[in-house]
Amino acid sequence: MTFDRLVARARALPPQSVDLLVAVVVGLFAGADLAVNEPGYRQADGFSWLLFALSLCALLWRRRWPVAVALVTGAACAGWALYGHIGELLNLPVIVALYTVAVQGSRRRTAWAAPIAAGASGVVALTVGKDVVNPQGLPVLEMVWPLVPLLLGEVVRTRRQLLAEYAARAERAEADREREAARRVAEERTRVARELHDVVAHTVAAMTVQAGLALDALDRRPDVAREAMRTVRDAGKEAVRELRATVSVLREPGGESTAPAPGVARIPDLVSGLTGKGIDIALRQDVPASAGLPRMVDLAAYRIVQEALTNVVKHAGARHAAVSVGLRERRLCVEVVDDGKGDGGQGPGGPGA
């Protein structure tokens, strides 16, 4: 098993299990150093093992009270040194505690913990050096080692904060992308609904006019009725074609229909499909084929005329209507006027536009 897998499994353990595992590992190394001491120094006794037990028990609470645990383990380490028991690994408990102070705290806490830990270690080194022939180390060096776990903890904590910030930014970016996708879907639904409404409303209105004409002329003029029914059939086919073109936008991965969109060039067909029973529509169109209208403008002009004529047939009660489409000073102008009452013939009113 590789070291990375061991670290991954250790991180997957509950915090209490990790603290217990850390205390056991520290106890193995520190206990071995405590049991075997150099000749000429105090050997391990009951007081030394008591300090050892207090240090390990304190490590079990290092996440909840890191500063208090650092004070307890630091006092135990100082007690060993002042008691005359010298060991290179006896400072492991306080090293772990100082690391926890930095990794779970803040930069401010690390800043004030560093001089306190370094100063306490230097004072202990000076005190011990006065009482023994061979001092355990120079005070300057003894003041440096407490700073190492604090610096390491500060680096780890800063890295964790950066990773958390990066993860939060990624989540925000993903949420923004999802919102943008939802907005585009809503806009596309609105556009498709508008297209379906324009196609269905206009075609049904035209089919209603032609069907009424066919019904009135069925007995007296069957040829007129037959022609009206052909118009109804053609209108139905055209509606189905436009509906398929519109719905295909929802089915194709690219979201674009390959069928040509209706435009100004098809307005004459639109007008002829409504000309019939009870209404006469005049068309004036002055848009050359070389005008090169933008696709959206071309489609918008067609839909404006389509919706206006549908409203004329369904609501205006008009007998005459006029459609004018032309270019004026590089602008496409669309005008639809009628002589209806504007309320379906139910009340007084003037010509509609």
Image (tube, grey):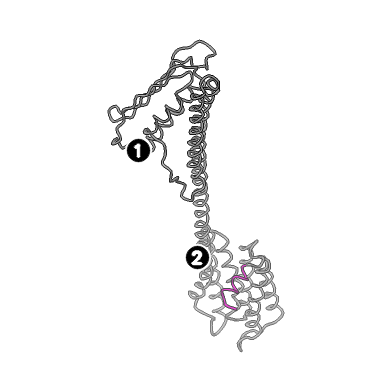
Figure quadrant of the N terminus: bottom right
Q: Which residues are magenta?
A: 1-11
Q: Above or below — where is 228 with respect to 296? A: above
Q: Which of the pair 252/23 is nearer the observer?
A: 252
Q: Residues within 10 Å of mark 2 (few under 14, many from 20)?
A: some
Q: Nearer the viewer, residue 225 or 300?
A: 225
Q: Of tags 2 and 1, which is closer to the observer?
A: 1
* Numbered badge on residue 155: 2
Which type of secondary structure does the marked residue at label 1 adopt? loop
Say which residue label 1 marks: 294
Within 10 angstroms of label 1, few (less than 14), some, or many (20 or more) residues? Answer: few
Q: Against 346, is 228 above or below?
A: below
Residue shown at 48%/74% (left/top)?
A: 140
Q: Position of residue 46 (x, y in %)?
A: 72, 79
| Main SS category, magenta section | helix
89 part of magenta stretch: no
